[in-house]
Amino acid sequence: MNQTLIEFLRRREDLSDFVFHFTKGFEARETLKKILNEGQIKDKGNNGYICFSDSPLTMLAPMFDLFERYINPMYAPYGIGIKKKYLYDLKARPVFYYDPDDGLDLSIIDSWRLVKYVPEKYDFTWLREWRCPQNSINLTYDDCFVVVKTNSDILEMNDMLLELDDIDIDAQPEDGGIRTEYTGYFTRKFKAVSLEEISIVSQMNKEQLRCTLNEQSNQDSHYLGSTCE
């Protein structure tokens, strides 16, 4: 990639290195948990493809604010961000928006990439949709990250984001007994960011988002508690 293009992409907040697959409905959070447990995004509707949005995460707050009004929203703030290059290698491509009245020869375009577009009547161009013609897509630490609504969601999903490797046991004499402390050492399976965190730092830009993700080490430790005998 030439340096001019790198600088151009860095400066444009409306462009992203990732595309996003968001879950939907009132069970959106549970659906995301299932995706994490399985380590895959699947074509549940047997469409022949899996959908993504190219809209930058740091600019999606208005969309989710609108969907908050609905009990069963089209999209919810729970999903997976995946690097475009990773999906591109799996044959993912931007969709082709077309007007049925244009009389275009659509036979030269794969049908799974076609999305109807009629201004003011049928318009989903705001999704900047990509589609990947796969039945399932494996999630990887290097190419994916998790998106949730709140910081508390990250804490709730820690057992899906982290994998326990070892427990350190430290026994210390205390008041005639023994106090034993336990520290767990974990490998991070997925990085994660909350929309709440993005909002707190005043509409985090994409460079700040990149730094937030890069600061999440693939190793972590947590104090698990203590017992006294």
Image (cartoon, rainbow, N blue to C red):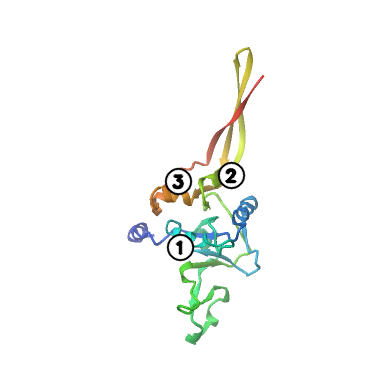
Q: Residue furthest top?
A: 176
Q: Is residue 14 left or right of residue 80?
A: left
Residue flagged by tag 3: what amino acid is it? Asn
Among the two numbered marks 1 and 3 on one chain, the one whose residue lies closer to the N terminus: 1
* Quarter residue 158 falls in: top right
- Per the model, the C-alpha gap separating discs 2 and 1 is 27 Å
- Label 3 environment density (alpha carbons within 10 Å; few <14, some 14–19, many ≥20): few
| Front: mark 2 or 1 | 2
Residue 104, relative to residue 37: is it above or below?
A: below
Closer mark to the observer between disc 1 and disc 3: 1
Residue marked by disc 1: 55
Q: Are marks 1 and 3 in contact (CB under 8 Å)?
A: no
Q: For marks 3 and 2, give the one nearer the viewer.
A: 2
Residue at the image point whose x is 54% and y is 59% from the top: 76
Which residue is under mark 3? Answer: 214
Q: Which residue is mark 2?
A: 156
Q: Is residue 132 visible?
A: yes
